[in-house]
């Protein structure tokens, strides 16, 4: 009788171990599924934010009319010209801030891993870099003002990160193959 009781306990321990192993596998499978869903949701959130661009920066037409934003090269707009246009027409200042804030919001979303970096980079890298370059003087001027010291810094950091990544990729590609 004692042998039967020991065998039953042994089988119970083995079944318990097997059950724990299967539970661990299930937890890992659920974790991988949630991880994949999280990545999908980040990409979807980035796409949704990008689709809001026409609504969020609809007044970019005003910026184009004021600064010929779309017609010019990537040269920086003179600070005096931007400040004068903003003083003449408060709508220009609102449009400019809306424009900059939209891209800053995308950059913050990427930095906080709400939005997928690759999705935003593919869609906005060029326009974000041009915007940053063209309004660099205005941005620097705004940062000199007390409450605006961190104005549009995430956009700047994200563009710098993308540039560094591109340089790294170029340097990897430009290496000569060894025999």
Image: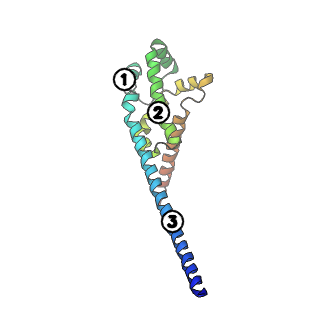
Q: Residues within 10 Å of mark 3 (few under 14, many from 20)?
A: few
* Residue that badge 1 annotates: 61
Which quarter of the figure has residue 47? top left
Q: Is residue 14 left or right of residue 125?
A: right
Q: Residue at x 39, y 32 (%)?
A: 53
Q: Residue furthest top?
A: 88
* Residue that badge 3 annotates: 23
Q: Residue at x 44, y 56 (%)?
A: 33
The residue lying toward the viewer, choosing from 132 and 50, is 50
Q: Residue at x 48, y 29 (%)?
A: 101
Placement of 50 over or under 8, stated as above or below:
above
All told, the count of numbered labels is: 3
- Which is more foreground, mark 3 or mark 2? 3
Q: Residue at x 56, y 83 (%)?
A: 7
Q: Residue furthest right?
A: 146
Q: Is label 1 in contact with label 3 (beta carbons under 8 Å)?
A: no
Q: Is residue 5 left or right of residue 176?
A: right
Provide the secondary structure element on which disc 1 rests.
Answer: helix
Cα–Cα gap, marks 2 and 1: 16 Å
Quadrant that contains the N terminus: bottom right
* Residue that badge 2 annotates: 103
The residue lying toward the viewer, choosing from 89 and 22, is 22
Q: Earlier in the sequence, mark 3 or mark 2?
A: 3
Provide the secondary structure element on which disc 3 rests.
Answer: helix
User: Where does the image place residue 119, in percent across and percent down from the top left?
Assistant: 42, 44
Residue 17's label in the rendered image is none
Q: Earlier in the sequence, mark 2 or mark 1?
A: 1
């Amino acid at each position: 009788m004692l042998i039967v009781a020991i065998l039953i306990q042994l089988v119970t321990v083995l079944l318990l171990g097997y059950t724990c192993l299967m539970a661990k596998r299930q937890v890992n499978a659920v974790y991988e599924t949630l991880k994949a869903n999280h990545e999908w949701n980040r990409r979807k959130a980035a796409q949704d934010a990008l689709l809001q661009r026409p609504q969020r920066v609809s007044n970019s037409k005003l910026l184009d009319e004021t600064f010929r934003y779309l017609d010019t090269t990537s040269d920086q707009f003179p600070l005096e010209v931007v400040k004068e246009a903003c003083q003449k027409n408060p709508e220009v200042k609102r449009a400019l801030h809306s424009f900059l804030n939209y891209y800053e919001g995308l950059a913050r979303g990427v930095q906080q891993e709400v939005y997928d970096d690759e999705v935003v980079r593919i869609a906005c890298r060029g326009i974000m870099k041009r915007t940053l370059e063209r309004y660099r003087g205005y941005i620097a001027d705004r940062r000199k003002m007390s409450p605006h010291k961190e104005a549009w810094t995430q956009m700047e950091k994200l563009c710098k990160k993308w540039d560094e990544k591109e340089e790294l990729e170029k340097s990897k590609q430009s290496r000569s193959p060894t025999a």
